[in-house]
Amino acid sequence: MTTKLSLAALDAVKAKAGVPSYDRTALKAGIVHFGVGNFHRAHQAVYLDDLFNAGHDHDWAIVGAGVLPSDEQMRAKLAAQDFLTTVVEQDNNRTGAHVTGAMIDYLKPGDVAGIVATLADPAIRIVSMTITEGGYFIDPASGVFNPTHPAIVEDAQNPTSPKTVFGLVVAGLKARRGRHIPPFTVMSCDNIPGNGEVTHAAVSGLARLFDPAFADWIDANVAFPNGMVDRITPATGAREIGIVATDYEIDDAWPVFCEEFKQWVLEDHFPQGRPALEKVGVQFVPDVAPYEHMKIRILNGGHAAIAYPAALLDIHFVHEAMEEPLIRAFLAKLEHDEIIPVIPPVPNTDLGDYYKLIETRFSNPKIGDTIPRLAQDGSNRQPKFILPSTADRLARGEDVVGLALVSALWCRYFAGTTDSGKSIAFNDQNADRLQAAALAAKEDPMAFLALSDIFGEVAQSDLFRKRFAKALKTLWEKGTRATLQLYLEGKLTA
């Protein structure tokens, strides 16, 4: 028999799972968070829950917000269980569940007046976001904010009825300025290099389209700290809901599964104050960039590297990909030969040891992370996770056999069938043009590299073009297994 998750049911729930030790009804909001997905609930919300459990900073609770149809679905499910979430941490040697209560409300998506009023509340001192790598209106190749994106243009033309996160943030800041309330800090929690600078560019860039003087005020007064976030968090499906019901006897409409490991590195730039997150393991450092490079290139780049060979070999789970000797060896060689050597030193960190940790985390069979999740949104992820390493090596005059193979595997994947002939279901906003380019590339490899908004200057390198063409030709002629083997033997050069 299961217990429906709610505040009233916590006494029953605690027989099987941890529950908040603080008085949930006494929390006060201090943060508005856009993009209440699984990662946020397994990461930022968990850190705050830990802090509240330790007896600190109960005026920093979270109010959720969003702009997408899926946000309304999440809001409805969480509202029905008093905004509580069951978090199941699964490591190779242990599994445990606890209920978090750091979120106390969720604003209705589409209620612009309500959202802006909350953003203008002096109690709100931080506005944070996890809106995915593709949510920042960045030109993939250049990494620069794109002011011509239709959604941005529409918000600039209608600043009092914004439809994007950044339009709402700008409206909230404008309301605060008009009432002489100090601006909140804007904190990105997405996997983007320089995520604070990227967020600043989007907020200020949108404001500049319709009010340059206000954009200047944002530049001078609003803080956008950079941060690095890390915790592997798969999607929730029937499997996860069923495990929570069976193993913990909790009826949770949208639980979160994740690994035990988590990390958060932040610049300490919060003019209106912040919760004492250092008490629960957050690292505050003067410069996040070394940690970002390490995590985004080794972990996220590693995920991007194994996603497509695994998909082409009909492998569903990430841990199963790591059990395939060819893929495990491919990842290790790629990381050690081409990715790690171009990562700047990280304070008090051995990059070789960090990769061993990543390898262990990828191999965790309990969290059920999937290859389709890793393979989605490649048009945003490849330019952020893979191509920067490629560009760095080319700039240093070094070879890119493995990194070009990653790009070729991505191209081969978008031809639409696995090596066994099964159809591939894409999850990418650019899927149609990617597939058209990938199919054309079977005869002319340069057709894929002609996606200049993705490949940028990397595609102009004669060496990269040569390595990519060789890898793609081999994938079509010999298949994924043979191609990986040739790479491991050092025989994939033209």
Image (spheres, helix red, strand yellow):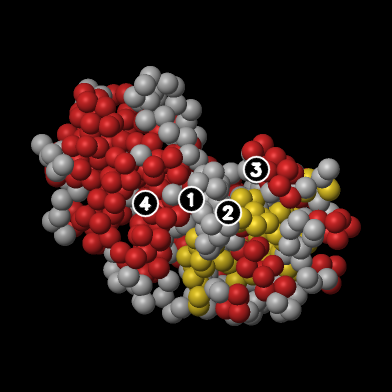
Tag 3 and tag 4, C-beta contact below 8 Å:
no
Q: Residue at x 44, y 22 (%)?
A: 423
Structural distance between the alpha carbons of marks 2 and 4: 23 Å
Structural distance between the alpha carbons of marks 1 and 2: 8 Å
Q: Residue at x 64, y 50 (%)?
A: 256
Task: Provide the residue designation for mark 1.
Answer: 364
The answer to which of marks 2 and 4 sits earlier in the sequence is 2
| Residue depth check, mark 4 versus mark 1: number of the one nearer the observer | 1
Q: How many marks?
A: 4
- Horizontal placement of 149 versus 301: left or right? right
Q: Secondary structure at mark 2?
A: strand
Which quadrant is the N terminus positioned in?
top right
Q: Nearer the viewer, residue 296 or 419?
A: 419
Q: Nearer the viewer, residue 471 or 286?
A: 471
Q: Can you tell which mark lies on residue 90?
A: 2
The answer to which of marks 3 and 4 sits earlier in the sequence is 3
Mark 1 residue type: Asn
Picture coordinates of residue 170, whole percent (x, y): 62, 61
